[in-house]
């Protein structure tokens, strides 16, 4: 599973409008917001993040499943990437958001339970 793209996320300061747009366009089922403002898309295929509390950014980002998030971030920085969201461990997963040298946002992640 390592180094495969297997998740996506949309960041929006207006999650209601984004939900209406993507569900209208693609027929995606977008769940209700969690207490943190995160909505699951298509079950667990992706997520829609309410960014109004964290600077209001807009983005679409793909997640690459890696074996070691900290090492992947270090390698990416060595190749010219910039960290946008430092490594987060929310108990279930570890992830970080980066910008590639051309300014494209991407993320690396791994589940904490690797059984």
Image (cartoon, helix red, strand yellow):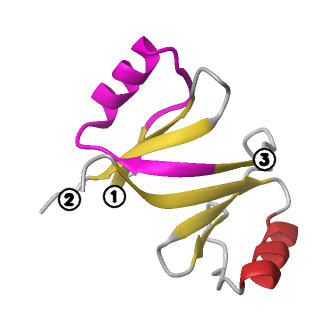
What whole-number distance in Å separates the C-alpha atoms at marks 3 and 1? 24 Å
Q: Position of residue 54 (x, y in %)?
A: 72, 42
Dot 3 or dot 2: first in sequence order is 3
Residue at horizontal 36%, vertical 20%?
A: 74
Based on the picture, tell me whether residue 115 belongs to the magenta stretch.
Answer: no
Determine which residue is flagged by label 1: 92
Residue at horizontal 84%, vertical 74%?
A: 21
What whole-number distance in Å separates the C-alpha atoms at marks 2 and 1? 7 Å
Q: Secondary structure at mark 1?
A: loop
Q: Position of residue 12 (x, y in %)?
A: 78, 55
Quadrant in which the N terminus appears: bottom left
Quadrant in which the C terminus appears: bottom left
Of 20 and 54, the residue lying toward us: 20
Residue at horizontal 78%, vertical 38%?
A: 55
Q: Are marks 2 and 1 in contact (CB under 8 Å)?
A: yes
- Range of magenta residues: 61-87
Q: Position of residue 109 (x, y in %)?
A: 38, 47
Mark 3 or mark 2, whichever is nearer to me: 3
Along the horizontal axis of the image, is 40 left or right of 4?
right
Question: Is the residue 82 above or below the residue 41 in the image?
Answer: above
Dot 2 or dot 1: first in sequence order is 1
Q: Residues within 10 Å of mark 3 (few under 14, many from 20)?
A: some
């Amino acid at each position: 599973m390592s180094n495969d793209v297997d998740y996506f996320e949309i960041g929006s300061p207006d999650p209601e409008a984004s939900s209406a747009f993507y569900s209208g366009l693609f027929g995606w089922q977008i769940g209700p917001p969690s207490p943190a403002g995160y909505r699951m898309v298509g079950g667990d295929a992706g997520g829609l993040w309410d960014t109004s509390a964290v600077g209001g950014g807009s983005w679409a980002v793909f997640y690459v499943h890696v074996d070691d998030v900290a090492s992947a971030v270090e390698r990416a920085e060595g190749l010219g990437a910039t960290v946008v969201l430092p490594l987060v461990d929310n108990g279930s997963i570890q992830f970080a958001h980066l910008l590639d040298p051309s300014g494209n946002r991407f993320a690396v992640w791994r589940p904490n339970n690797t059984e």
